[in-house]
Image (spheres, rainbow, N blue to C red):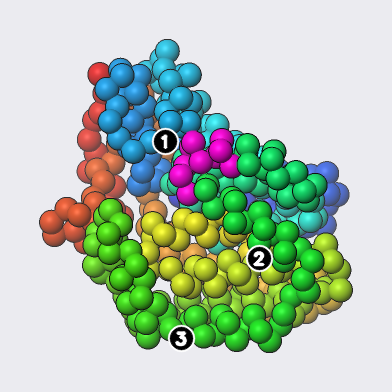
Amino acid sequence: MLTLKFYTIYLIIIPLIALLISQKKKYHFIPFLIIAILGLIRYDTTTDYSAYVTGFWDIRNNNYSGWFEPGYVLLNQIFSFSKWGFIPVLMISIFVPYIQIYKLFKKYDIVLIGTLLFLFLGYITRFENIVRQGLALGIFYFSFKYIEQGKFVKYLLMTALAASIHLSAIMFIPYYFLIKYVSIKKPPVLFSGLILLILYILTMSGATATFLSILLKDVPFYTVYTENLEIGKLSLGLTLLFNTFIAWLPIIFVDKNNKNYWRVINLSWISAGGFILVQNFIVVNRIFEYLYIFQIIAISLMLKKMFYQKIRAVAVTLLLMMFVLHVRRDLFYYGNNIYNTIFSQKSMEHKFYKRHHKWVKHYKPEDNVDRSKEIKKYPN
């Protein structure tokens, strides 16, 4: 039965990318393809996986009363002829954004370095967790062409489709005008750096959390997601500072005279600013999730230029720092656990690891790291 240790993905992909750097571009798709295949056949890899499976079974039996949007419910109903229908549903939710991300990487000629950052910045595990929004993100990436063509009506249709799958897609509307605006504005080096620094200081001091707490006090589950804020914590501050710096740095290294890059560079630092502002509020930060791809593209363009200009030591150092932070964050979470697939024994027996939720008494962050406890769930 097909299972892997989580870290095995990195042991395969990183050497493969290094090997393909000197090869013809027609082979550069291979690492991304491997990542995509693993995403398509995953089983119970992330916190929300079992919720989507049991949600599918409830929809199949016409007794679902949860929070899924009508478009996503309809997608489940299409495959409800089988108790295994959740597999194609989750596959579609990965395939749609992944194919659009690959097209963006190819458009900017960053397939290899973009794939590496897809791993190092934790996007692979992110997409496996935000299933509904991941599908909405794919629709958003697809709709870029309507922004470029100025076809607002078609863009609105895509917005309606995406919002029927994840309500956060309502942000498509203001993003249409934002993307149009920043596409014709030269990236402001000093101004953007100053804005990010001010936001960083306000966040670390707790000022932004206080302000947003007042605004968000009536949001469902607000206290659940904010009661253990680590405001001003040194380790958090250093990580946030690095992430901010790495999202702003492309303004210096990427060719600002090339208008094709203006949109990417501007949205990279704007996205970073948004995440600084709401980084303690994991529900609200979903609205900036749609712009995060621009950080990956901008940083990839920067690293690519560094390699070409023979300042490879700086590029390698930045990559190592990103990887170390990723190890500290995501790889700690997944650790030595198994990357199960739909072909595993666990899948055949409908076994899931036991989740722990923040609203459960005596919850500890390390609880979700322990996946040794399994429970069985069966379709009704």
Name the residue tied to disc 2.
Answer: 267
- Which of the 4 image quarters holds residue 77? top left
In the picture, the disc for residue 308 is none
N-term-proximal mark, 2 vs 1: 1
Q: Give the image location of residue 290, x and y in percent.
A: 57, 54
| 184 on left or right of 371 | right
**Split into 4 quadrants, where in the image is the N terminus?**
top left
Q: Give the image location of residue 92, x and y in percent.
A: 55, 31
| 58 on left or right of 86 | left
Q: Amino acid at mark 2?
A: Leu
Judged from the image, the secondary structure of the residue bearing numbered disc 3 is: helix
Name the residue tied to disc 3.
Answer: 201
Q: CA distance from mark 3 to mark 2?
A: 21 Å
**Split into 4 quadrants, where in the image is the C terminus?**
top left
Instruction: Please tell me which residue is depicted at 67% across the width and 73% down the height of the picture.
Output: 316
Q: Is residue 344 above or below residue 8?
A: above
Q: Amino acid at mark 3?
A: Ile
Between 315 and 145, the residue placed more toward the observer is: 145
Count of marks overlaid on the render: 3
Judged from the image, the secondary structure of the residue bearing numbered disc 1 is: loop
Name the residue tied to disc 1.
Answer: 69
Magenta stretch, main secondary structure, is helix
| 350 on left or right of 28 | left
Q: CA distance from mark 2 to mark 1?
A: 28 Å
Can you see residue 138?
A: no
Instruction: Please tell me which residue is depicted at 56% across the width and 70% down the height of the picture.
Output: 272
Q: Give the image location of residue 165, x and y in percent.
A: 48, 37
- Point out the stretch of residues depicted in magenta: 159-168
N-term-proximal mark, 1 vs 3: 1
